[in-house]
Image (tube, grey):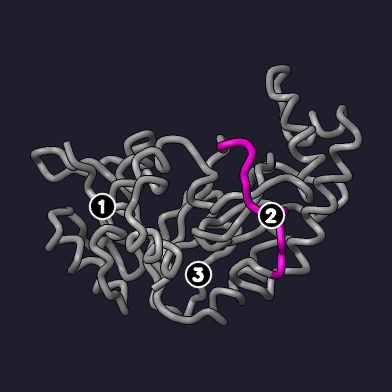
Amino acid sequence: MLILLPPSETKHPGGSGRPLDVDALAFSSLAPQRRATVAALADLAADPAASRRALKLSERQLGEIDVNRRIAESGTMPAVDRFTGVLYDALDAPLLPDRARAWLGENVAIQTALLGPVGALDAIPAFRLAAGHRIPALPPVKRLWADATTRAFADHGGSVLDLRSEAYRALGPAPDESDHVYVRVVTESDDGAVRALNHFNKRAKGLFVRALALAAPALSSTGDVAEWARSAGFRMRSSDAHEMLLVAPD
């Protein structure tokens, strides 16, 4: 089972791990794209004005340029600990027991604009680059990652549970031939009408993955996920062949 999460624009700074080692990351076939993106982002940081335009930085975010300048030499931490924000606050990975963290490492990947999908426990540096940004020296982010990432997912094999946002889903669609579902978080009214969520969408995803990690179930198909979810008290159902609805708790 491969569970895909989106990243967050907000991140913990620093890190005590060794500098980024592209060859140590999951989905090793993406190493050429990763090296090109890391190098191009560091080069872009040498021009603060160009960085500010490309990365859409406000005055108070200009420190992110120096973060990118040092990207190849700065300390790292596990990807699931690097990201902050609503989803990752709900997941609260740093406080999970070792067994649950190991389950995340085996089953969860986080889609990024810098490195493509990385394993939950892959060591990554702080950086500033999102799906909506464009590094002038490179093709658009979607063109850079989409086909190569889909091939990497196909090589990985297994079922795919996709909890990414639409923007990051576009950076690496699940292979058409795979057993895959996209999870859409909704709220449901008393009359059965459903409505998509934003803030609570992220929180629900974080809580769902945290519950999965704590339970550490053996999952071999997306159907297994739906069955586990119902047994664990989550309201989850199929809406079509490749989409499931996760009803956020009240």
Q: Label 3 neighbourhood size at 10 Å, few (<14), some (14-19), many (20+)? A: many
For badge 1, the amino acid type reads Leu
Name the residue at 62% across, 68% down: 149
Residue beneath label 1, please? 246
Q: Earlier in the sequence, mark 3 or mark 1?
A: 3
Name the residue at 19% across, 41% down: 249
Question: 244 and 101: which one is in front?
Answer: 101
List x then y, in percent, for residue 110. Answer: 52, 56
For badge 2, the amino acid type reads Arg
Q: Label 2 neighbourhood size at 10 Å, few (<14), some (14-19), many (20+)? A: some
Q: Label 1 neighbourhood size at 10 Å, few (<14), some (14-19), many (20+)? A: many
Residue beneath label 2, please? 18
Residue beneath label 3, please? 174
Q: Earlier in the sequence, mark 2 or mark 3?
A: 2
Name the residue at 54% across, 52% down: 79
Q: Helix or strand or loop: what does disc 3 sit on?
A: loop
Spatial CA span between label 2 and label 3: 31 Å
- Magenta stretch: residue 18 in it? yes
Spatial CA span between label 3 and label 1: 19 Å
Q: Are marks 2 and 3 in contact (CB under 8 Å)?
A: no
Q: Which stretch is magenta?
A: 12-23
Magenta stretch, main secondary structure, is loop
Question: 229 and 24: which one is in front?
Answer: 24
List x then y, in percent, for residue 8. Answer: 53, 41
